[in-house]
Amino acid sequence: MKSFDKPQSDTSQATITTGGTILSISRGSSGLARRLVQLYAGLALYGISSALLVAAGLGLEPWGVLHQGLAELTGLTIGVVSIVVGAAVLVLWIPIRQRPGLGTVSNVFVVGIAMDATLALVPAPHTLGVRIPLMVVGILLNGVATGLYIAANFGPGPRDGLMTGLHRRTGRSIRLVRTAIEIAVVATGFVLGGTLGAGTVLYALSIGPLAQLFLRVFAVPKASASSAPVAGGSPEGAILRP
């Protein structure tokens, strides 16, 4: 009589005994699928939120100021500039021995593509009654996006990795390294024609708390987070910006 094995599901059960207690951990493709969805949804939403800040015209996040300034200088779209800058920053990882993950490489391309696609669809508003809500929505969505992609735990964005790598190599605090880089980025972008304004200040004050909130909301269970290798540490230790 022929026997048949039970069909396997997308997940498998691992039983672990610890301190006399049996723990059953679900693992497999479902956890990886969730993380991939979070990663790409977060990166796309990040690009959309950045585009909304550009459309509002009331001030951009620090790296956005640089991207806009370079776009004004070169005639390229801001999304293409974001991709070029992200790739250039990634090259700087080599001497500081940072290791990119899937999220790192995806960040370079997805954010820029989403920015240009959004700006092509969203008409430029002219009244403050539209621009102010657009700025607020952009900042809020940016916090959601940051929580999504960092919690997926596929590696930091290029700009975050530069900060953490310099912190590790120089021994300087994250705060000092981040502040120095962002002052240089904002100053350069502003000189080139990037937009500073109320949005820049509001973003700086709110992105940390927003990202921390949404990191908790979108946190992936550790069993799922360990289902595939990634570069970088835990999401909680990440700098909250791609």
Image (spheres, rainbow, N blue to C red):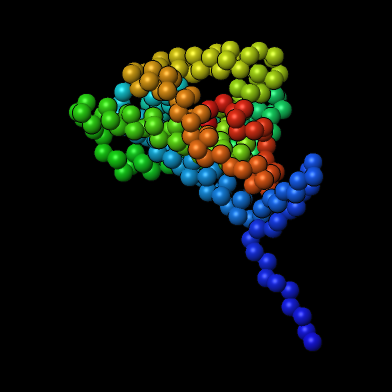
Give the residue displayed 51% in from the left and 29% down from the top: 212
**Could you tell me which residue is drawn at 45 percent across and 32 percent down?**
143
* Farthest-out residue, bottom: 1
Instruction: Answer with the quarter of the image where residue 3 lies.
Output: bottom right
* Camera-side residue of 58 and 235: 235
Could you tell whether 132 is left or right of 185 in the image? left
Give coordinates of residue 140: x percent, y percent. Answer: 39, 32
How many tags in the picture?
Answer: 0
- Looking at the picture, how far across and down is residue 45, in whole percent? 43, 40
- Horizontal and vertical percent for residue 7? 67, 70
From the viewer's perspective, is residue 58 above or below residue 183?
below
Q: Residue at x 61, y 25 (%)?
A: 162
On the question of residue 29 being in view, the answer is yes
Residue at horizontal 57%, vertical 33%?
157
Viewer-closest of 98 and 37? 37
Q: Is residue 193 visible?
A: no
Q: Residue furthest front?
A: 20
- Asked where in the image residue 125 lies, by quadrant, the reply is top left
- Taking the image as shown, residue 82 lies to the left or right of residue 155, namely left
Percent across and percent down for residue 129 are 20, 28
Image-based side of 12 in relation to 125, left or right:
right
The quarter of the image holding the N terminus is: bottom right
